[in-house]
Amino acid sequence: MTRIFVTFDDTDTLDCGRGTGKLARWFEGELPDGCVMWGVVRQQLLVHPDVPYTSHNSSACVVIDAPSANVVPLLIDRAIAHLEKHAVDGSDPGLCVATDEAPRLHILQAFAERATREVLTQADAIAAATAAGVHLSAHGGTSDGIIGAAAGTGLTIDGWSGRFIEYGGEKRLRDFPDIVRVGDLVAEGMIVLPVDRNVESAKPDDLVDSLGWLRPRLWGGRPAVPVLRTEPGRWQAIGRSTGKAKSDAE
């Protein structure tokens, strides 16, 4: 089994009514036979006056489990067609595709970490992707989307940042009720992590209030739901997005 990372960046405009995250989630419908979406992870990049971005400067990485790396050329072709169909006029789409078998992923990960704190260039992204042995391509506009696409891939591969905007278990994130048993989250492959000081672990029958916005974090390569205890046996998920428009864009 090979894990493949397909990252899209800058596929929207400020007034188009949806974000890159939604386009990334739609890509599940384009996966070849034998490929399964593990999740879609939103990665936050540097917000800076010298960095052009639509609204929040984030990219979205579709994480796919595939039978082998032989499917990568087909995934690239389908991702490009997906961009041609869904990217909004006036956007600057970029695409990065990598596998966990690429020989020098540490180079891409180092570039990605820099992208969270430094203003980087297209040349920086191309150099990192080339050295790491991964696919990187621009598909319109200024081509600036390749910077975020490369960075989003590296951060997701690293496994310690980003939040899931979709998760490919039997139940999808938007299928869970606002208040859900800890055991039900664990059964779908998520972990529930209390972040209070000196607090006990969450028990299977404890309840988590997601406030209508269940978005696990990518921590240690796993989907983790950080929670605070509100009373014995009750927890509240932290980090809820502010504003309906932002949530809808994902």
Image: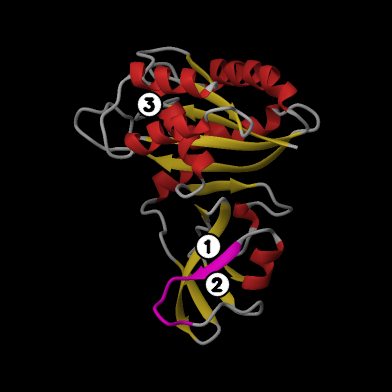
Q: Position of residue 66 (x, y in %)?
A: 73, 33
Q: Is residue 203 above or below residue 150?
A: below
Looking at the rendered structure, the secondary structure element under dot 1 is strand
Regarding residue 19, the answer to whether it shows in the image is no
Q: Is residue 54 above or below residue 73?
A: below
Single out the mark in the foreground, 3 or 2: 2
Q: Amino acid at mark 1?
A: Val
Q: Position of residue 74 (x, y in %)?
A: 70, 18
- For residue 197: magenta? yes
Task: Check whether the beta carbons of the residues at disc 2 and disc 1 lie within 8 A of each other.
Answer: yes
Looking at the rendered structure, the secondary structure element under dot 3 is loop
**Position of residue 215 in the picture relative to residue 101 (left or right):** left
Q: Residues within 10 Å of mark 3 (few under 14, many from 20)?
A: some
Give the color scheme: rainbow, by chain, secondary structure or one colour.
secondary structure
Magenta segment, which residues? 191-199
Looking at the rendered structure, the secondary structure element under dot 2 is strand
Q: Position of residue 200 (x, y in %)?
A: 51, 82
Q: Position of residue 197 (x, y in %)?
A: 39, 78
Q: Which residue is mark 3?
A: 13
> What label sits on residue 225 in the rendered view?
1
Residue 47 falls in image quadrant? top left
Q: Is residue 51 above or below residue 80?
A: below
Considering only order in the chain, which callout, 3 or 1, is on the residue closer to the N terminus? Answer: 3
Q: Amino acid at mark 3?
A: Thr
The residue at 69%/27% (across/down) is 30
Q: Which residue is mark 2?
A: 208
Q: CA distance from mark 3 to mark 2?
A: 35 Å
> What label sits on residue 103 in the rendered view?
none
